[in-house]
Image (spheres, helix red, strand yellow):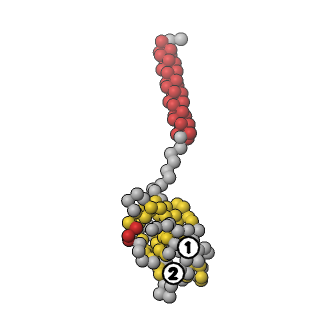
Amino acid sequence: MDEHSSDRRNFLGKLGGAALVALSAEAAWASLRFARAPVSYGPSQRRNLGHLDRFVSSRVYVGDAGLFVGRDSKGLSAMSATCTHLGCTVREAAEGGFVCPCHGSTYDEHGHVTGGPAPRDLSHVRLLRDVRGNLIADLSQTVPGEARLQVG
């Protein structure tokens, strides 16, 4: 065997070894990335609706959060302004309750469906109060319509 063949075999052996190391490193990296999958929980679902003093009337629309905040003798509640049919924003109806301008679904003042194609009532979300007296809506937690945040 001549010297040229021996150098060539050594070179190909080293090249094959380097390729095997690179392939092993890539497989290890992919395995680690799989084991530690990046999880994104998205943006916070809590919205600061403003100071409690803002909510003295019976109903206030908070456009940033897409909520109607209502106040009665039992406390405060927050109801989604998103129609359960196709996601349009409902409006207060002149005769009371709410109406969807897109397809005509109607809801009573508590968010219960009274007509139209909407399949479900409007949802209510949990309200919290922070230490500064701000009202916080947790959009990730739905509550029964009769749930109220006590203010006083």
Q: Earlier in the sequence, mark 2 or mark 1?
A: 2
Q: How crowded is mark 2: few (under 14 residues within 10 Å), some or many (20 or more)?
A: many
Q: What residue type is labelled 1?
A: Leu
Which residue is outermost to the bottom? Answer: 95
Q: Residue 122 carries which label?
A: 1
Residue 12 seen in this snapshot = no
- Name the residue beneath numbered marker 2: 98
97 or 88, nearer to the observer: 97
The residue under the point 53% across, 36% down is 32
Residue 110 seen in this snapshot = yes
Q: Helix, strand or loop at disc 2?
A: strand
Q: Helix, strand or loop at disc 1?
A: loop
The residue under the point 49% across, 67% down is 150
Across and down, in percent, residue 108 comes to: 55, 81
Kindly check if marks 2 and 1 are in contact, taking CB atoms under 8 A apart as contact.
Answer: yes
> Relative to 127, does residue 105 appear above or below in the rendering?
below
> Relative to 132, does residue 14 appear above or below in the rendering?
above
**In which quadrant of the rendered view does residue 63 lie?**
bottom left
Across and down, in percent, residue 100 comes to: 51, 80
Which residue is outermost to the front? Answer: 152
Across and down, in percent, residue 60 comes to: 43, 75
Across and down, in percent, residue 18 comes to: 49, 25
Q: What residue type is labelled 2?
A: Phe
